[in-house]
Image (cartoon, rainbow, N blue to C red):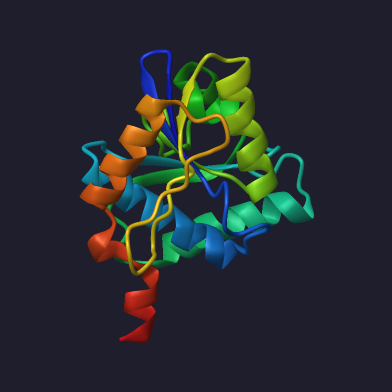
Amino acid sequence: CIILAKHRTLFVADTNITELPTSEDMAEIGVQVAHAARDLGYAPKVAFISHSNFGNPDTEHSRRVAGAVAILDARTDVDFEYEGEMTPRMALNERVRAVYPFSRLKGEANVLITPGAHSATISTKLLGEIGGATVLGPLLIGLERPVQIAQIGARVPDIVTLAAMAAYNPDTEHRAWTKKGE
């Protein structure tokens, strides 16, 4: 989803496809969404979201999120800022994040990779309903053909925007399925 709120744009994933992604899934989702954000004109700053900050508390779920960061750390083709695992507040507030001076994320994150479809969907729906944000999507990337989904209750401007996104199809060169099949 793309969230438009309070003079900021956020990309939140995965709201629709992977119910409980593995560390590997989250790393790949992070790469794909970062590239899509860049294709739309944003410098991606990716935060891998959790209920914990850098292993505190250390739980099975926080280790899964931290594992995605470790996977990206081991790659040589990552061309965007990323950090995690961290809470949404930590990701979106550089002043709060100053408590962790080792954090490599500078400024506010604009791509939030969540630990499951449930947390992403709940977050985006709350932002849209009580936070006054405009929620576009979910945006589907990584598919053979451009497809977008209009949510129940979508307004005409939302549908027009989704149609434009499908026509623009920013994800053409970053499909995981094409790279895996080569």
Q: How many marks can you see?
A: 0
* Residue 36 as seen in the image, left or right of residue 94: left
Q: Please name whichever residue, 33 or 99, is drawn nearer the observer in this view of the structure.
A: 33
| Residue drawn at point x = 24 percent, y = 41 percent | 40
Residue 179 quadrant? bottom left
Q: Please name whichever residue, 46 or 143, is drawn nearer the observer in this view of the structure.
A: 143
Q: Quadrant of the C terminus?
A: bottom left
Question: Residue 113, image x and y in percent?
Answer: 52, 46
Q: Please name whichever residue, 38 or 51, is drawn nearer the observer in this view of the structure.
A: 38
Residue 174 quadrant? bottom left
Q: Say whether residue 107 is visible.
A: no
Q: Say whether residue 136 is visible.
A: yes
| Residue drawn at point x = 30 percent, y = 52 percent | 35
Question: Residue 53, image x and y in percent?
Answer: 64, 37
Question: Residue 129, image x and y in percent?
Answer: 61, 19
| Residue drawn at point x = 45 percent, y = 26 percent | 155
On screen, residue 18 above or below 167: below
Q: Please name whichever residue, 168 or 51, is drawn nearer the observer in this view of the structure.
A: 168
Q: Residue furthest bottom?
A: 182
On screen, residue 46 above or below 130: below
Question: Residue 118, image x and y in percent?
Answer: 69, 45
On screen, residue 163 above or below 178: above
On screen, residue 31 above or below 113: below
